[in-house]
Amino acid sequence: MAQTITKSMIKFMEDLGFGTFGTNLYVYQVPDSKFADNDIYWLIPSGGTPTRQLYTWGKTKRYAFIVHYRNESTEVVDDKMFEMESVINAVKCPLLEGFDVYNVQCDSFPTDSDLDSEDRMVGTMTIFIELLDSHK
């Protein structure tokens, strides 16, 4: 099976200690509240848009991952989001298996109440990753 940018991002997050896929790290959506922890991450991937032509005739593609983190404690959400933003912005070029990373940055947003009104808080950030595209 071909490696995708989403699978590589999941592995990257797991390696940094931000969740375990299928346990408290999910893609697109989370299981019903009866089956999922309150302490979870979920990713919403998008992108693949060509962004720049390099002088070597290569191109870069930009991907975005919206990352949500949910917990019952506002303080824990704030701490986790600050930690994730600090770690990811400190990494010059993360090792995403199967991809050549050109640049990475993330923006975080304020903590808010979870949409399902079950006394939980959600933090959100967007991680932007630019890849070198070897296709010419």
Image: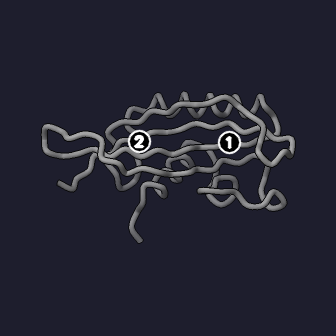
At which x and y percent is residue 128?
44, 39
Q: Is residue 6 above or below residue 16?
A: below
Residue at the left extreme, as displayed = 56
**Residue 35 picture quarter:** bottom right
Identity of the residue drawn at 53% across and 31% down: 107
What amino acid type is highlighted by mark number 2?
Answer: Ile
Name the kind of residue labelled 1 in the image.
Tyr
Front-lying residue, 43 or 115: 115
Q: Which residue is mark 2?
A: 129
Task: Tell me the residue that label 1 is attached to.
Answer: 69
Q: Residue at x 86, y 46 (%)?
A: 118
Q: Is residue 67 above or below residue 77?
A: below
Q: Quick one: label 1 or label 2, which is nearer the N terminus?
A: 1
Q: Secondary structure at mark 1?
A: strand
The picture places residue 111, in percent across and down from the top left corner, at 71, 31
Q: Position of residue 45 (x, y in %)?
A: 51, 51
CA distance separating discs 1 and 2:
19 Å
Q: Dot 2: what SS?
A: strand
| Residue nearest the viewer, comparing 13 with 61 | 61
Q: Quadrant of residue 82?
A: top right
